[in-house]
């Protein structure tokens, strides 16, 4: 890493193992010298302080989408490569990439299913699922907890919520991994081709499943969305397909790594009891599953002495914000009862993670249950992180008990 204060730029390769395995020393060095900087690898301005990240997540002068107010030509953007068109056409209907009023309309349709009081009804099912997973490997004395525990919980829960058959979980997971790889630093033509292929296949599957669900509706989120489409034309079929896939993708990708990172953290900290809500929040702050969130400037503006033109991207370093000593005393120390704990791992503003109540509940159930059932749980080896920045999750989590 090289910090050039004169040019206000940082040279840091996000696929450097030393960085993606432990980005926090780099974040501290950058925040201390140049908290607002141009990350040369990405070519846009980034923000490492909690104050800036929190403010920019909420600032309506920035958005996840820009093409609703400006054409690619106006912004000086090149044409979308032909091989990426299916992926970008799909993304154009994604709740995560939209701004009001379309974002407001789509979010309102699914929001009630993720309200805390609705999610709480899933507690018995999640508890039963977690117990059943532990039953499968308890007698073996060892396990790889990402595949055996952290992954099945959110995937199966989201499948049940949507009404998608759980026997498709592994295929849905494979498609999802290929699609979200488009957002990682380590991206090449092979990654792009796999993402496009997965997008087409996942969309085709979902269209076929929606057709069957129209004929046999049930009490699930997908049936609710179909009814909304049929009754008031509140969403198109393309929006319905993209929304269902987004829920499946977003519903497990971050949560899997939130659970995995939390288990690693608790084992390293020697914490086996008292894993309550505050402790779960601290795991999310201490080692967040998502470290970079980008937004577009929706107008020409100035922020923190930086002039930004309409359409320019900015990067918000969630992982750095969560370790900012100006907001979190002793930021590199894990404090189970930390209060207050305004961590930004779920974002903030209108794009605050809609699945946050469900992710929190899954963690609040799964983590204490795992340690209760396996009191001798220990790391079999020091786990490493995936080369997939801006996601931050383990490659594997091998344990003994």
Image (spheres, helix red, strand yellow):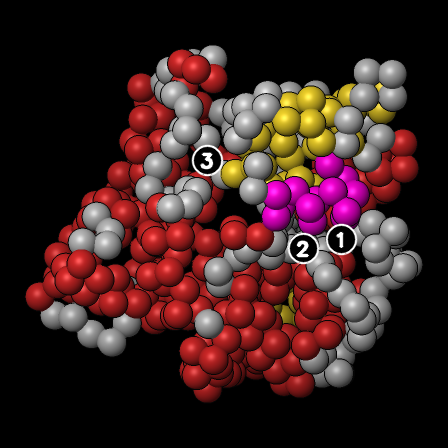
- Secondary structure at numbered mark 2: loop
Could you tell me how far apart the alpha carbons at marks 2 and 3 are, in whole angstroms? 21 Å
Residue 311 image position (x, y, % from top left): 52, 24
Q: Is residue 5 magenta?
A: no
Pointer 3 residue: 65
Q: Left or right: 48 with respect to 256?
A: right
Q: Are marks 1 and 3 in contact (CB under 8 Å)?
A: no
- Secondary structure at numbered mark 1: loop
Which label number is shown at residue 344? Answer: 2
Few, some or many residues within 10 Å of mark 3 (<14, 14–19, 20+): some
Q: Left or right: 166 with respect to 157?
A: left
Q: Are marks 1 and 2 in contact (CB under 8 Å)?
A: yes
Magenta residues? 47-59
Looking at the image, is mark 1 or mark 3 nearer the viewer?
A: 3
Looking at the image, is mark 2 or mark 3 nearer the viewer?
A: 3
Res. 374 visible in picture: no
Pointer 1 residue: 322
* Image-quadrant location for residue 211: bottom left
Residue 42 image position (x, y, % from top left): 63, 25
The N terminus: image quadrant: top right
Residue 394 image position (x, y, % from top left): 64, 52
Q: Left or right: 333 with respect to 391?
A: right
Which badge, 2 or 3, comes first in the chain's sequence?
A: 3
Few, some or many residues within 10 Å of mark 1 (<14, 14–19, 20+): many
* Image-quadrant location for residue 160: bottom left
Q: What is the number of callouts on the image? A: 3
Res. 343 visible in picture: yes
């Amino acid at each position: 890493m090289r910090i050039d204060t004169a040019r206000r730029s940082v040279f840091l390769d996000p696929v450097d193992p030393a960085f993606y395995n432990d980005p926090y020393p780099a974040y501290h060095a950058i925040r201390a010298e140049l908290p607002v900087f141009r990350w040369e690898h990405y070519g846009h301005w980034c923000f490492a302080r909690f104050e800036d990240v929190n403010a920019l997540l909420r600032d309506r002068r920035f958005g996840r989408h820009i093409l609703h107010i400006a054409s690619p030509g106006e912004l000086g953007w090149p044409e979308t490569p032909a091989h990426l068109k299916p992926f970008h056409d799909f993304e154009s209907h994604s709740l995560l990439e939209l701004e009001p009023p379309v974002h407001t309309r789509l979010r309102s349709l699914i929001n009630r299913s993720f309200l805390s009081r609705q999610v709480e009804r899933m507690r018995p099912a999640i508890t039963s699922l977690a117990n059943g997973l532990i039953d499968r490997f308890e007698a073996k004395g060892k396990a790889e907890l990402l595949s055996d525990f952290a992954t099945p919980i959110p995937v199966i829960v989201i499948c049940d919520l949507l009404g998608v058959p759980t026997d498709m979980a592994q295929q849905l997971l494979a498609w999802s991994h290929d699609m979200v790889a488009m957002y990682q630093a380590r991206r090449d033509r092979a990654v792009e081709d796999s993402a496009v292929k997965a997008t087409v296949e996942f969309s085709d599957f979902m269209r076929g499943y929606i057709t069957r669900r129209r004929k046999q509706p049930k009490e699930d989120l997908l049936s609710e969305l179909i009814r909304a489409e049929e009754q008031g034309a509140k969403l198109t079929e393309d929006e319905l397909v993209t929304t269902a896939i987004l829920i499946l993708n977003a519903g497990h990708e971050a949560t899997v790594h939130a659970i995995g990172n939390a288990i690693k953290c608790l084992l390293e900290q020697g914490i086996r009891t008292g894993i309550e809500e505050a402790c779960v929040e601290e795991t999310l702050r201490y080692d967040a599953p998502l470290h970079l969130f980008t937004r577009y400037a929706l107008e020409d503006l100035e922020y923190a002495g930086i002039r930004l033109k309409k359409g320019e991207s900015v990067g918000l370093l969630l992982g750095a914000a969560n370790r900012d000593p100006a907001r979190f005393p002793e930021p590199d120390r894990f404090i189970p009862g930390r209060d207050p704990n305004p961590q930004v791992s779920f974002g903030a503003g209108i794009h605050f993670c809609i699945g946050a109540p469900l992710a929190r509940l899954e963690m609040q159930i799964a983590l204490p249950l795992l340690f209760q059932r396996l009191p001798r749980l220990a790391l079999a080896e020091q786990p490493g992180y995936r080369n997939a920045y801006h996601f931050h999750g383990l490659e594997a989590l091998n344990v003994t008990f």
